[in-house]
Image (cartoon, helix red, strand yellow):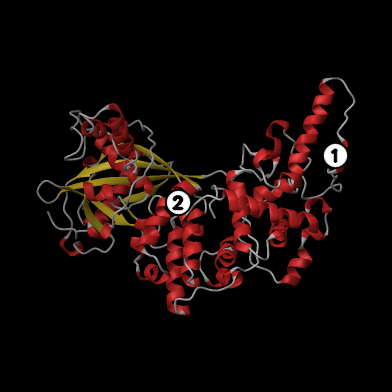
Amino acid sequence: MGRSATKRVPKREPASPSKQKARDPTLHHSPYHVFTSEETATLRKDLLTWYDRCQRDLPWRRRASEDMDLDRRAYSVWVSEVMLQQTQVSTVIDYYTRWMKTWPTVQDLAMASLEEVNEKWSGLGYYSRGRRLHEGAQKVVQEFGGQMPRTAEDLQKLLPGVGRYTAGAVASISYGQVTGVVDGNVIRVLCRLRCIGADFTSPAVTDTLWNLANNLVDPDRPGDFNQAMMELGATVCTPKKALCSDCPVQSLCRAYKKVELDSATSLNKLVNRRASTPIGLVSDIEECVTSCPLCIQPSDQWDRSLGVANYPRKSAKKPSREEQTVTCVWERPGEPGNTEYLLVQRPQKGLLAGMWEFPSMLSEKAQTVKERADILCRRLKELSGSEVSVKDLQFVGEVIHIFSHINQTYLVYFLRGFSVKEEDEEHPVMRWVTRTQFMESAVPTAMKKMADLTIASFNTRGLNVPEKRSQILYHLHKRKILKLCESHGLLSGGAEPSRKRKKDISAIQLPAGKARVDGGQRSIQSFFKAAVKN
């Protein structure tokens, strides 16, 4: 726990000891990539000594050490481990603190609605993590009487979204089960310690890393040892600029010795001498067997400038999928002094499940501007029961949002007015909210990112320079699509209206926009009003 965001080893089903032994790659390859019993003992001692002295003070560690109730401890570790997947520690701290304040036990989380969970998770990304946490909590309460599974095997088998790593972390930290963990930081540490240079996502390397982790874990302090390995990777053995001089296990690191030997050899060549390496250095360096599947492969060249960062290596990342979506910011008059905007709930399965967004439809890139507008008009008719003409839509611009595997381009339109059919007033997947309510509630990041410099400028008049900079940065982190409309002077009660005439959508040039999102969330339920006829 407490690590930088790095891609994990793919989830694999736990195997029986006999099967693991049969396929253990370390049984068939050079001892160059394993630890002797003496090295294992030294690593455990030196690493735990360093961890006791240098570990970071993190809220989930404090809670796990203070809470003597096994189920509460396991729940708190589970929440932190899920949040830390693909997310940096600095980001997780505030989310974790708010989450545990709202739902301190698994029973509290089980009683929450999925919508509340999505809102609390908003901004962390990878929303399926929060949904599976919620599903798992309900299963623990409904099927296990509120008692968390007690072993890594049961945690992985019984709880949705819990893979081999998360199960091992919860079991070792909460229950003291002697089992290793392999996350991105542990991959990096182990690959450098044993010069494992093949693609770490390959089955051979994956199995080797898990075997190493299980053999190294300290039987007396398994939870602390696993956290120490991850802490080492997060703070010392970092991806690009490793702090080798601060490493407590430097003497066991084959990658470090390889870099030292490479530097010594290069220096001797520069002074036109025959390479001469100190005996102490040569005696510690072994050569691996020929054609070893765990070593850096012949097709991958050693890069002297990278040093120990030559390890680990992975295959090239698969390019993200390109998608295009048409979306409409639909505005109508609400209560006196307030303007309302239509939000629609996404399906309960798939990307951003159960989240709220502006009315949207996927669009093919080959479609013309008019075809895209027609698609959006049909969607709006489904929601309102009223005919919406292309002439009523005003094209605003383009917003780009990057998901983990999708590059999403939103083509944003604006619509003012129109009523909703009487029979749709209690539509369960459609709500009208005010601008303030929208800005404070939880919707997908792509819908949140549209704040407008004009609004920031209006709201920061009279402030000194640091205060103004702080306020403008806050506004830049706000909702992107809404802000794009504000920047065009379209929203009532917002930016100063533009006096420009409506643009013909057939002659639009699409500008790009980027922004970030931050800030606390309020429950969108507290803002919802039933759709009413104007």
Judge depth for marks 2 and 1 and give the one in front.
1
Q: Quadrant of residue 171?
A: bottom right
Q: How far is mark 2 from mark 1, CA to CA?
A: 45 Å
Crowd class of label 1 (few under 14; some 14 to 19; many from 20; radius 10 Å): few
Secondary element type, mark 1: helix
Horizontal side, residue 454 vs residue 60: left or right: left
Question: Could you say where residue 521 lies in the image, as x and y percent from the top left?
Answer: 31, 52
The residue at which mark 1 appears reads as 280
- Report the amino acid beneath label 2: Val
Residue projecting furthest to the left: 336
Crowd class of label 2 (few under 14; some 14 to 19; many from 20; radius 10 Å): some
At horizontal 39% and vertical 67% (from top left) the residue drawn is 109
Question: Could you say where residue 74 lies in the image, as x and y percent from the top left?
Answer: 50, 67
> Foreground residue, 413 or 440?
440
Question: Which circle marks residue 253 in the picture?
Answer: none
The residue at which mark 2 appears reads as 92
Horizontal side, residue 172 vs residue 107: left or right: right
Q: Quadrant of the N terminus?
A: bottom right
> Foreground residue, 431 or 360?
431
Residue projecting furthest to the top: 271
Question: Could you say where residue 334 lies in the image, as x and y percent from the top left?
Answer: 14, 50
